[in-house]
Amino acid sequence: MENILYEEILGDMRIVYNLDNETGMAGLCIIPDTDIPYADRRVKIHSLAEVKIIGDNYSGNYFGGQSMKYSDTTNSLKYKCQEFSEDNFSKSIVTYLKSANGLEVRHVLTYTKERNYMTISTELINNTDMNVTVEMLSSFVFGNISPYLDGAGENSMLLHRLRGKWSQEGRLISETLEDLQLEECWCYANSNSMRFGQAGSMPTKGYFPFMALEDTKNGIIWGAQMGCPSSWQMEITRADDGVWLSGGIADREFGHWMKTLKSGESFSAPKTFISVCRGDIDDISSRLLEAQEDNLDIPESEESLPVIFNEYCTTWGCPSHENVSGILEAIKNKGIDYFVIDCGWFKEDGVRWDISMGDYIPSDTLFPNGIDDTVNMIKSYNMRPGIWFEIENVGRMSKAYDNEEHLLKRDGITLTTQNRRFWDMRDKWVTEYLDEKVVNFLKKHDFGYIKVDYNETIGIGCDGAESLGEGLRQNMRASVNFFRHMRHECPDLVIENCASGGNRLEPCFMSLSSMASFSDAHECIEIPIIAANLQRAILPRQSQIWCVIRKADSLRRLAYSISAALLGRMCLSGDVTEISDEQWRIIDNGIAFYKAAVAVIKDGKTKRFGPRIKSERHPEGYQAVVRTNANKILCVIHSFAKSPRKITVLVGACVIDKKYSHAAFGAEIKDGMLTIENSGDFSGYGILLDRI
């Protein structure tokens, strides 16, 4: 039996807290504020918090190794009370659960007014008289999905997830619950759960901390996005007709995590953004991205989305005063605002950059007059100088590599991969060392931009805490705090978040960064596909997209590359000292078009059109990305192999303002549909439209 404990409409979302009168368990559902009637279904309430401590019986249901839900502690948590608070900006509902032995959960749901998402945080408080060791704690649990489908709603629910691998970030995977074997059991006796996530210090390697569940029959979609810089997990669970979504820090089974709380201590799980709406995957993604926008902390210089030049794909890890000088002369007066010296500025003669980071002494060979000479030269061209660091790792040819006292360990042995070791970011000596090597270096040489790279993962964890997973969590929390420290010491510092390209594209690191390297797909044909995919995961204004220019590029290829950069932040690189005037014309026009489109790149909502791209390395067909704000529409179209002669996209009531490609192309709007004449395979187009 159950009843409604509390419900309220927040924006266009309705939250419903249910109470099971027999068990005292409280659960949470969110639904759109709609008049669609509820269906007849068999649904049991799930607790709005899942907790497993050592000593609990396991749930049974064949869950061992698959899920740690339904523990004794979870089942013992009874509803205690709710508290409400409100100000001009937000409203919070705090729900307290308590077990007989004194364990308490503080569950906070916060709605940001005039926005389209809510934030959930969950805190476990040990009010017992003994230590408890936690093996699992959820950040969020909500469900009863979908209340509008009769019974189990067969063939009507679709789970959306975002996959991540090196140079193929953000791929959308959409699967029916039947394909995932999440149909209800024939006798409703057993639960089934699918747990996914990642273990290590690259939080978007494998999957992004994102999930969305769509009721395709009624056009309603639920979504959750979690901010966690270390190991995390999400679960989709079914025991009857209802489906429940949950997630949090990766548990003992999945992420080797345990946390001991002394009497009186508490622990908070990572925050999660949740939402529900009438719409599709692009609609729910836009709502969750509002939370990332609201949590941004970036310097004023970023408001115009400046164009970047990064010399990596020009010098390939061997920057010098001489080659930087030639690049600057080639790109002067081109509308480029930031110039980044990438990796290699510190390498000793005859040693590769990727095995020598850690000591960070500028090379006398590459910069014979000192790095200040190069910084001053960059500033003389009216560009902000930037520089690359890999702060948390050290290479095997550096002196820092042998400083094992201050490096992470596992099983008492220094944690070592093929070429790297890891600073223990919890170590005061390490933070003081990095303060001198990084922060004071930035101040001394007047760098206004830092690219923070991260080219290896710690894996399951490290020593120094009660579990490997907790050691990892603490270390990554210390890394996050160092990001904050850099901004505190250098308030106008632009921070670029990079992890072998896009392996840290999660809300915590993104909130601390002006932008992120979207991928290491430096000059691949799949760049526009990856860039479009990532608009569901991060804000386009923060998605720094490589636009690598080669002297052998045709005009068509140049426009293809530049059009891809219209899907985020434009970052130029490549053979700029060797290209022709005709090639420069295409580049100059592209930069001008980008600057005209900044307002809608910065503030808008995205819809993707076109067939599903089966192979990103060998794409066929086309894609169109339409981004809309109150005044403008930016349509970015790319054709691939076997592309159609005409491409038609829904844009609504508007007129054409500007067009961009390698050559003139036909474009018209009729009945809200934009049709362009495709110039051929692997062409790129930008169309800026005025809304009417």
Image (tube, rainbow, N blue to C red):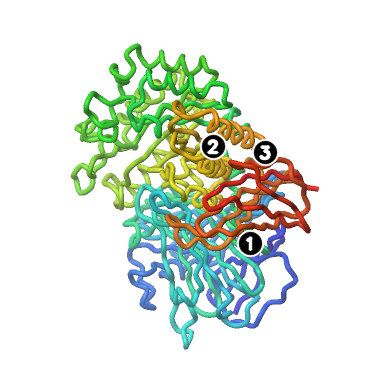
Q: Which of 90 and 604 is in front in this view?
A: 604
Q: Nearer the viewer, residue 421 or 475?
A: 421
Q: In this view, does 185 lie to the left or right of 626?
A: left
Q: Is residue 373 above or below residue 571?
A: above
Q: Which of pointers 2 and 1 lies earlier in the amino acid sequence?
A: 1
Residue at mark 2 to residue at mark 1: CA–CA distance: 32 Å
Where on the picture, by quarter, is residue 241? bottom right
Q: Are marks 3 and 1 in contact (CB under 8 Å)?
A: no
Q: Which residue lies furthest to the top in this view?
A: 369
Report whether residue 435 is seen: yes
Q: Nearer the viewer, mark 3 or mark 1?
A: 3
Q: Which of marks 2 and 1 is in front?
A: 2
Q: What element carries label 2?
A: strand
Q: Crowding near pointer 3: few (<14 within 10 Å), some, many (20+)?
A: many
Q: Is residue 614 left or right of residue 672?
A: left
Please tell me the numbered disc located at residue 276.
1
Q: Which of pointers 3 and 1 lies earlier in the amino acid sequence?
A: 1
Q: Which of 520 and 161 is in front in this view?
A: 520
Q: What element carries label 3?
A: helix
Residue at mark 2 to residue at mark 3: CA–CA distance: 14 Å
Q: Position of residue 689 (x, y in %)?
A: 72, 45
Q: In this view, does 567 lie to the left or right of 486?
A: right
Q: In this view, does 165 lie above or below 143?
A: above
Q: Mark 2 points at which residue?
A: 570
Please tell me the numbered disc located at residue 599.
3
Tag 3: amino acid: Ala
Q: Where is residue 503 in the image (x, y as percent from the top left)?
A: 41, 47
Q: Crowding near pointer 1: few (<14 within 10 Å), some, many (20+)?
A: many
Q: Is mark 1 on a helix, strand or loop?
A: strand
Q: Residue at x 45, y 56 (%)?
A: 616
Q: Are marks 2 and 3 in contact (CB under 8 Å)?
A: no
